[in-house]
Image (cartoon, grey):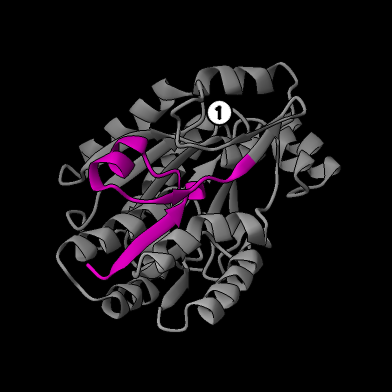
């Protein structure tokens, strides 16, 4: 191939698949207890310990990568004589994409004979992974860069997620909800249902009472928004709640046996905002309803 397909670790791409398909990944930063780390897709992170630290009061923070770091990732590709297709997490969730665009301008000026295509997936975490995996399937089949990039552009709003959180304090800390809403929701045991919108933002679309109803709602909406259940895997994500993830998988499989369902961890960057106990179902289906 005359180009390289690359993504970032905010996709929560399972490390085993990164290795299997040799997918280059930009590792995104986070800090815990004042020390900076990079999300290397679980190679060096013990997920249970990370979320246990959050339960004990640790408050990890995330940050955007700068232009210089992206140059370090991108320039070896272009200098080797290959073009680059980069599938980035949603521009609506971070200013990071501006650093990518700046790095792209610098490199195209330095290597005018090369091409560098950037696609804003309007997704994060497993919905982004599903787009990356389908795109890489085309890449391995020898499809040209323009065709792969266009497929992602045409299908990115079909990558969906329905997720809920266990403790509202993490959404409050990240400014997603007010202190009043968090206190009231906790008192009433309200669980928000959050989606990735057509604009690429995280939006609450419903509030249900109790975890059991939240899981039932996720199942209902997943089945309602599926198109072809055999087209791509369905990814159940969780942050330190494997039993509930298994229950969600089992309910989905019972209702739609054709689904190929994988259980994966929510990585530290996304998990810093959701906290432990987050649960999601991610899939390729119909166009996002909102």
Query: Residue 281: which quarter of the image?
Result: top left
The one nearer the camera, 110 or 147, is 110
Tell me which residue sits at (23%, 64%) in the image: 139
Tell me which residue sits at (31%, 34%) in the image: 249
**Residue 45 percent across, percent down from the top left:** 51, 25
Tell me which residue sits at (42%, 48%) in the image: 126
**Residue 108 percent across, percent down from the top left:** 51, 79
Residue bearing the label numbered 1: 277
Residue 60 drawn above or below residue 232: above
In this rendering, position of residue 269 left or right of residue 263: right
Quarter of the image with the N terminus in it: bottom left
Tell me which residue sits at (59%, 68%) in the image: 103
Chain part drawn in magenta? 1-29
Residue 287 seen in this snapshot: no
Q: Give yes or no for residue 61 being in the magenta stretch.
A: no
Query: Residue 57: which quarter of the image?
Result: top right
Packing grade of label 1 (10 A; few <14, some 14-19, many >=20) is: many
Residue 212 drawn above or below residue 172: above
**Residue 266 percent across, percent down from the top left:** 49, 36
The one nearer the camera, 46 or 168, is 46
């Amino acid at each position: 191939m005359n180009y390289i397909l690359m993504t970032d670790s905010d996709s929560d791409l399972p490390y085993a698949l990164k290795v299997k398909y040799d997918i280059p990944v930009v590792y995104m930063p986070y800090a815990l207890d004042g020390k900076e780390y990079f999300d290397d897709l679980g190679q060096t992170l013990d997920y249970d310990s990370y979320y246990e630290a959050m339960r004990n009061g640790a408050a990890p923070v995330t940050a955007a990568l700068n232009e210089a770091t992206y140059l370090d990732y991108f320039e070896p590709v272009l200098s080797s004589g290959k073009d680059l297709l980069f599938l980035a997490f949603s521009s609506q969730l971070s200013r990071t994409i501006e650093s990518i665009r700046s790095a792209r301008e610098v490199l195209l000026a330095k290597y005018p004979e090369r091409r560098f295509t950037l696609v804003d997936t309007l997704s994060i975490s497993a919905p982004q992974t599903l787009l990356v995996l389908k795109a890489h399937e085309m890449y391995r089949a020898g499809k040209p860069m323009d065709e792969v990039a266009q497929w992602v552009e045409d299908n990115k709003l079909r990558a969906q997620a329905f997720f809920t959180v266990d403790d509202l304090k993490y959404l409050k800390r990240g400014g997603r909800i007010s202190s009043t809403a968090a206190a009231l929701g906790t008192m009433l045991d309200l669980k928000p249902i959050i989606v990735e919108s057509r604009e690429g933002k995280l939006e609450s679309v419903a509030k249900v009472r109790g975890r059991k109803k939240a899981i039932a709602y996720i199942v209902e909406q997943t089945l309602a928004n599926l198109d072809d259940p055999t087209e791509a895997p369905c990814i159940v994500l969780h942050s330190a709640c494997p039993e509930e993830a298994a229950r969600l998988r089992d309910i989905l499989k019972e209702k739609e046996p054709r689904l190929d369902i994988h259980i994966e961890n929510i990585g530290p960057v996304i998990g810093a905002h959701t906290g432990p106990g987050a649960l999601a179902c991610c899939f390729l289906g119909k166009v996002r309803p909102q």
